[in-house]
Amino acid sequence: MADERQHRQVFHPSMNAISRFSIALAVMVVAALLAGLYFYVRSPYATGQNIVVDQPVAFSHRHHVSQLGIDCRYCHTSVEESAFAGIPATEVCMGCHSHVWTDAEELEPVRESYRTGEPITWRRVHNLAGFAYFDHSVHVNKGVACTECHGEIHRMPLVWQAESLLMPWCLDCHREPEGRLRPREDVFETEWTPDEDPRELGRRLVDEYDIEARTDCSTCHR
């Protein structure tokens, strides 16, 4: 009897199948969670891509750029010399709106800012991670157009982020810049079309502007 009790099976044989099923299920759940996380961080919900950001004033690039023909540099004054493109001061807005649309209700925040000296609190649309460094002046002076990163912003009634701004998107350009370049004098032309094959033009500009396909970590992470 003692030997029989000693060798009696503790668990039912079906527990083997249950154990195998539980392990397989756990692996699948973990894999599903990782896959879900992978797709989530690349989704527009996480990146902000194609989502219109509400602003204190509904500024239309389509109206100001495409319809009125205002150059990007009129408002973004430091884009050629600084890492930051610059946000126009209220005085820049009032340079025009002290003469046109002077009583428009939607422009009251601009007039109030001008009266009080308190800047308008614009909400950032293209917001890179804090550990990523981006210099507008470097890209502009190497022949990278505004529309390359901001999309057809000249057609946007309200601004949204046209690209994901994720690292793979940046690296695609850094690895093959020749497909995304134009002459410096045409960087701010929103309706620009090349007079020659874009790839041939790009390869020529890579040499002319001494562009290196830099993909080392320190290029963007400093």
Image (spheres, rainbow, N blue to C red):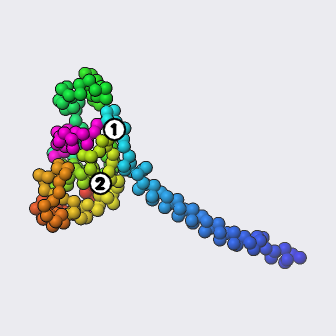
Q: Nearer the viewer, residue 23 or 190?
A: 190
Residue topped by disc 1: 123
Q: Which residues are magenta?
A: 59-80
* Relative to 62, residue 113 above or below: above
Residue 38 among magenta residues: no
Please state the horizontal and vertical placement of residue 103, each as a whole percent of the image.
26, 23
Residue positioned 19% across, 39% down in the render: 68
Furthest residue toward front: 67
Please state the horizontal and vertical placement of residue 162, each as a whole percent of the image.
32, 51
Q: Which quadrant is home to the N terminus?
A: bottom right
**Label 1 or label 2, whichever comes before in sequence order:** 1
Furthest residue toward top: 115
Q: Nearer the viewer, residue 163 or 30?
A: 163
Work out how far the residue at label 1 is from the one at label 2, CA to CA, in angstroms: 24 Å
**SS at mark 1 in the image:** loop
Q: Amino acid at mark 2?
A: His
Q: Nearer the viewer, residue 16 or 67?
A: 67
Residue positioned 15% across, 45% down in the render: 81
Q: Can you tell which quarter of the image residue 210 is in?
A: bottom left
Task: Give yes or no for contact between labels 1 and 2 (Cβ–Cβ under 8 Å).
Answer: no
Residue topped by disc 2: 221
**Circle on res. 60:** none
